[in-house]
């Protein structure tokens, strides 16, 4: 499992800058496995079969505008004067997913080094949103994105990459 605290990042979802973060952006990539056993081996694992991969990015947005919350909340509407989230049973996550690009900030500037860019070509913002208040009542909204495999012909199966496309 890869678990990386990316620190301060510029976060763009569908090419829209989501604004400031507080507490560091976290990226997790892990395998999902099925273990096989034999009665004669007791509880000893006999084989491991890969069942796929999970990719997750947790982004703590600092005082996000309502329009930003609408962009990252499935079922969210009217991000201009108020914000409302509705039960969206049956929503197709792949159809709603967009590209998520995280670029490290170094020396108070967005890095120009392509190796400081992590891209999830197909990312879906889940309903796993965590509201909290940080320093001095600062509103921090944790948004979790799930990476889905790309279906673009040159990148079929791609979950994420570091560096240029």
Image: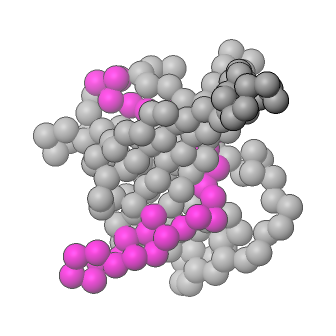
Q: Report whether residue 52 is seen.
A: no
Residue 92: image location, x then y, percent: 81, 53
- Outermost residue toward the left in this view: 107
Residue at (46, 75) in percent of width and height: 131
When asked about the image quadrant of residue 126, the answer is bottom right
Q: Nearer the viewer, residue 101 or 34?
A: 34
Task: State the scheme by which the image is colored.
Answer: one colour
Residue at (37, 39) in percent of width and height: 4
* Image: 130 above or below 159: below
| Total numbered labels placed on residues in the image | 0
**In this rendering, position of residue 34 left or right of residue 91:** left
Instruction: Specify the segment rendered in magenta.
Output: 113-142
Residue 86: image location, x then y, percent: 73, 77
**In this rendering, position of residue 97 left or right of residue 21:** right
Residue 137: image location, x then y, percent: 27, 83
Q: Report whether residue 77 is seen.
A: yes
Residue at (44, 42) in percent of width and height: 27
Magenta stretch contains residue 131: yes
Residue at (53, 56) in percent of width and height: 144
* Image: 79 above or below 13: below
**In this rendering, position of residue 122 left or right of residue 27:** right
* Image: 138 above or below 148: below
Magenta stretch contains residue 97: no
């Amino acid at each position: 499992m890869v678990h990386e605290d990316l620190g301060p990042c510029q976060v763009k979802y569908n090419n829209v800058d989501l604004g400031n973060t507080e507490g560091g952006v976290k990226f997790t990539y892990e395998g999902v496995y099925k273990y096989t056993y034999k009665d004669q081996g007791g509880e000893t694992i006999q084989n491991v079969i890969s069942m796929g991969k999970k990719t997750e990015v947790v982004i703590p947005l600092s005082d996000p505008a309502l329009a930003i919350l609408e962009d990252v909340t499935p079922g969210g509407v009217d991000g201009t004067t108020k914000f409302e989230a509705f039960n969206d049973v049956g929503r197709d996550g792949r159809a709603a997913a967009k590209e998520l690009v995280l670029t490290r900030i170094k020396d108070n500037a967005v890095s120009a080094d392509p190796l400081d860019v992590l891209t999830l070509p197909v990312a879906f913002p889940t309903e796993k949103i965590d509201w909290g208040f940080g320093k001095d009542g600062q509103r921090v909204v944790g948004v979790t994105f799930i990476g889905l495999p790309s279906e673009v012909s040159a990148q079929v199966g791609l979950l994420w990459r570091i560096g240029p496309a």
